[in-house]
Amino acid sequence: MQTTALHALHQELGGKLVDFAGWELPVQFSGGIAEHHHTRTAASLFDVSHMGQVLVRPTSGQVADAATALETLIPASIVGLAPWRQRYGLFTSADGGVLDDLMIANHSTHFFLVVNAARTEHDLAHLRSLGEVEVEHVADRSLLALQGPRAGGALTQLIPEATGLVFMDSVKLSWDGTEVWVSRSGYTGEDGFEISLPNERAEEFARRLLDIDGVAPAGLGARDSLRLEAGMPLYGHDLTEDINPVEAGLAFAIPKVRRSGGSRAGGFPGADVILPLLDTGTPRERVGLRAEGRAPVRDRAPLFASAESDEQIAVVTSGGFGPSVGGPIAMAMLPRGTAGTVYAEVRGKRLPLSVTDLPFIPHQYKR
Amino acid sequence: MGMIRYTADHEWLDDSGDDVAVGITAHATEELGDIVFIELPEVGAELTTGDEAAVIESTKAASGIAAPFDGVVTAVNDELAESPEKVNEDPTGSWFFRIRPADPGALDSLLDEAAYQALIG
């Protein structure tokens, strides 16, 4: 299994290490629920170095050429992405499904992409199919996420310039003589930052952050319950090649300029499938589910319209316990317009779940 | 009588009362993480060795407590169904159910403290 630059620190801090997409990373330190609450009330430091960091440079030297090339794979406005800003995007398939979700930052002369760990090799090959760009997999940098209402106060103690960033800014700053790439973003629904820095300085930086009052280490277990409460899809669960962006609730990732009638309409894989769906709507949609009882309802649990019905209407795509919600929550792709109560089958019993809007917990971004 | 026994599935059994109290070990709770839901058997249920007697859901996964031997459930700890986190806080003080073994010598073949400690290393 691969390890990150913080592996020894995780062990020292008592992290329970498990396999995440081939990487040995902490699922928890003190406990997943405690770490979840700490993130929502203070600040947590997550090691997300398993995620793929990728640089995409224009062979022409003109960054606009790289933007144009990326738009052939991703239905975002990348040409319109201002320098030092970041956007959420999707790699789409010819069938209109999703190959991965990612962050795209304009670093002025090139683009900086962050992709899912399990999809890194796929995405690198996919990007290398483009002729107009050089694709570099950044393996010598760690990626840390500092998340929570006290993240800003903590990070500015080490990097004062970080104070001026707003949600989705993505800039290069200096920490103690080292270049760090800082974005104001994350995947918890809280204010926070993702910080890319050289592996050889990652542990020292993490220790400096953890020395700050209010900052504690958190594992990827808490990150999962935080993103579930924040209503964010997880690739491989709520988002797959069999789920299109519109039914996944990700139409926001396809701006008007790339839609029918826009000045750069289409031109990405699956556009002929996806763009009409923006007008017609989809037969199913991603929704939240809240259990009425205490029993968690997990991924793949079959869903039924009634306690007696034999006809399965969907499966749970992500499910677990929501510490801030105070009970079991889940997400599923349900027939459009489904409201009220649906039933999950768990250990042979039908458990009632109420259909709710997402997110379960409002986002707290600093815009 | 009165000796705590263990199964290789990380259950503890205390036969100091009229019947056998069953819980899970501290090692098991560390492996499971935060426990958020417990489903208990019904009093009077007749269990065969290996039957799923209770279900424990942690934030990570669901797991079962298997009946350690044939017997009848004589009591359940409803407090745990209300407050499952108590198992994390005090695993050896949190019994799930009591069972009357069909064979009074049922516990003799289970692990003693030394054997269990050797098992978990």
Image (cartoon, rainbow, N blue to C red):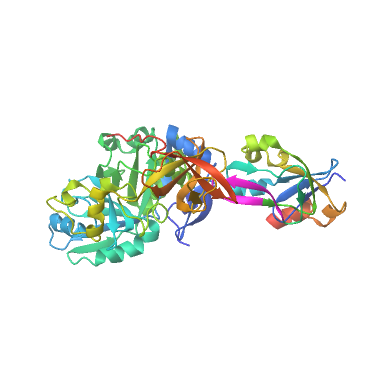
**Residue A349 pos. (x, y %):** 59, 48
- In this rendering, does residue A212 appear at all? no
Residue B42 coordinates in the image, percent (x, y):
72, 43
Magenta portion: prevailing SS class: strand
Confirm whether residue A59 shows in the render: yes
Q: Which residue is found at the position 84% from the left and 42% from the top?
A: B16
Q: Nearer the viewer, residue A367 or B77?
A: B77
- Compared to residue A15, the image places residue A211 above or below, namely above
Q: Position of residue A228 (x, y in %)?
A: 43, 44
**Does the magenta-highlighted stretch encompass residue B109?**
no
* Residue in front for this viewpoint, A107 or A304: A304
Q: Residue at x 71, y 42 (%)?
A: B96
Q: Is residue B64 left or right of residue A55?
A: right
Vertical position of residue A81 compared to residue A362: above or below? below
* Residue B120 horizontal side relative to residue A138, left or right: right
Quadrant of residue A226 within the rendered picture: top left
* A18 or A240, nearer to the observer: A240
- Quadrant housing the C terminus of chain A: top left
- Judge from the rendering whether residue A197 lies leftward or rightward of residue A135; answer left or right: right
Residue at coordinates 45% horizontally, 42% vertically from top-left?
Answer: A289
Is B61 in the magenta? yes
Q: Position of residue A221 (x, y in %)?
A: 49, 47
The segment highlighted magenta reads B51-64
